[in-house]
Image (spheres, rainbow, N blue to C red):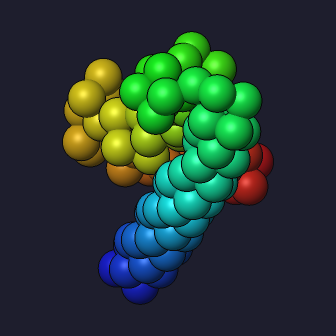
Amino acid sequence: MKTQDTNLKLIKAKNKVEKLKRFYTHLTVYVVINTVISVVKISNNMNNGDSFETAFFEFETFIVWMVWGIAIGLHAFSVFGINLIFGEDWEERKIEELMKKDLETFRK
């Protein structure tokens, strides 16, 4: 049983690292792509006669940041926030519960 617990903890740690890696990749893409979009929009607006301030503070410049930012927030909550609601050991308890059910089903 101790080996099984160790394997379970290793699998859980690998899953957590993979989730973190996907989140940080998503965050990096968010910042890079939105920066490029913003620079293009600001440049286009300035070429159309707007001042930098007017072009920068236009709603269209920030809408992509806001909408995609909601998605980033939800992704962050799925990676970091679940423990705030269920507690830190919730995942371990749930895994143990499911493993016991599987073991009981297997024995029948």
Residue 102 in the image: above or below residue 61:
below
Judge left or right: residue 26 versus residue 106.
left
User: Among all residues in the image, which is located at the extreme top?
Assistant: 59
Task: Report the label total.
Answer: 0
Q: Residue furthest bottom?
A: 3
Question: Which percent across, then down, holds residue 95?
Answer: 49, 49
Q: Quadrant of residue 41?
A: top right
> Which residue is depicted at the point 43% across and 78% down?
10
Location of residue 25 in the rendering, given as x and y in whole percent from the top left corner: 56, 65
Of the pair 12 and 65, the residue shown nearer to us: 65
Q: Nearer the viewer, residue 72 or 8?
A: 72
For the point 37% across and 50% down, the residue is 92
Decide which of 43, 69 is in the foreground and name it: 43
**What residue appears at the point 38 percent right and 80 percent down from the top-left corner?**
6
Dividing the picture into quarters, in which one does residue 86 lie?
top left
For residue 103, say whether it is visible. Answer: no
Q: Position of residue 85 (x, y in %)?
A: 30, 22
Q: Within the image, what quadrant is residue 9 found in?
A: bottom left
- Residue 79 image position (x, y, % from top left): 44, 46
* Residue at point 25%, 29% (across, down): 84
